[in-house]
Image (cartoon, rainbow, N blue to C red):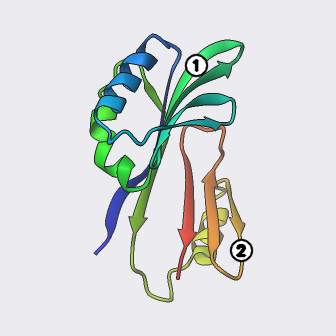
């Protein structure tokens, strides 16, 4: 049986007036363990796997929320209700037990035959298959894990 869970969620907004409201709500609902943090050009606050910050993008002030792991899976439904924020990245982890006949090189070969844009990175630890392009609306990354 396969299992799915949200593994990463990134939300952003150009309406930075919403940033203090969200920060206030999050600080009130936490155990007081938020710390100052930085991610890329964004400065803000971090708690567990949650980051909320502001920075500049295209010379305009921008607010961003990164949330990963079990914290993302537990809190995404309330975060998606934020009107001013939009999702820029959603990672869903789907664990599918397979037999030895279904593996990423086989999938890669079958997709390549259909002229679907894909690339494969193989390593001793695990293989990664990229389907689509980072610049497209949909981009899929598959990991083969033992």
Contact (Cβ within 8 Å) of mark 1 with mark 2: no
Label 1 or label 2, whichever lies nearer to me, is 1
**Res 80 visible:** no
Q: Residues within 10 Å of mark 1 (few under 14, many from 20)?
A: some
Q: State the image coordinates of residue 10 (x, y, percent, origin top left).
A: 49, 37
Please give the residue where the numbered disc 1 appears in the rendered image: 62
> In the rendered image, which quarter is residue 21 located in?
top left
Query: Which of the two residues, 143 or 114, is positioned nearer the viewer here?
Result: 143
x, y percent for residue 7: 43, 54
Instruction: Give the residue at x 50% y 39%.
Output: 46
Q: Look at the picture and state if 67 lies above or below 98.
A: above
Taking the spot 32% from the left edge, 42% from the top edge, the residue there is 31
Given residues 52 and 27, the one toward you in this image is: 27
N-term-proximal mark, 1 vs 2 = 1
Q: Which mark is residue 122?
A: 2
Asked where in the image residue 112 lies, by quadrant, the reply is: bottom right
Q: Residue 106 got which mark? A: none
Q: On screen, 15 above or below 114?
A: above
Judge whether 45 appears above or below 96 on screen.
Answer: above
Helix, strand or loop under label 2: loop
- Residue farthest to the bottom, as pictured: 100
Answer left or right for 80 relative to 133.
left
Left or right of 119? Residue 49 is left
Q: Between residues 31 and 44, which one lies in front from this camera angle?
A: 31
**How far separated are the C-alphas under marks 1 and 2?**
37 Å
């Amino acid at each position: 049986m396969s299992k799915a869970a949200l593994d990463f969620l990134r939300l952003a907004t150009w309406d930075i007036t919403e940033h203090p409201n969200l920060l206030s709500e999050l600080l009130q609902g936490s155990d007081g363990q938020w710390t100052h943090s930085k991610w890329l050009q964004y400065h803000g606050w971090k708690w567990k796997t949650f980051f909320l910050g502001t920075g500049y993008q295209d010379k305009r002030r921008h607010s961003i929320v990164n949330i990963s792991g079990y914290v993302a899976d537990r809190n995404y439904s309330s975060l998606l209700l934020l009107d001013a924020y939009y999702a820029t990245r959603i990672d869903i982890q789907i664990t599918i037990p397979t037999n030895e006949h279904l593996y990423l090189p086989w999938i890669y070969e079958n997709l390549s035959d259909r002229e679907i844009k894909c690339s494969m990175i193989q390593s001793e630890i695990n293989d990664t298959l990229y389907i689509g392009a980072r610049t497209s609306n949909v981009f899929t990354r598959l990991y083969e894990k033992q």
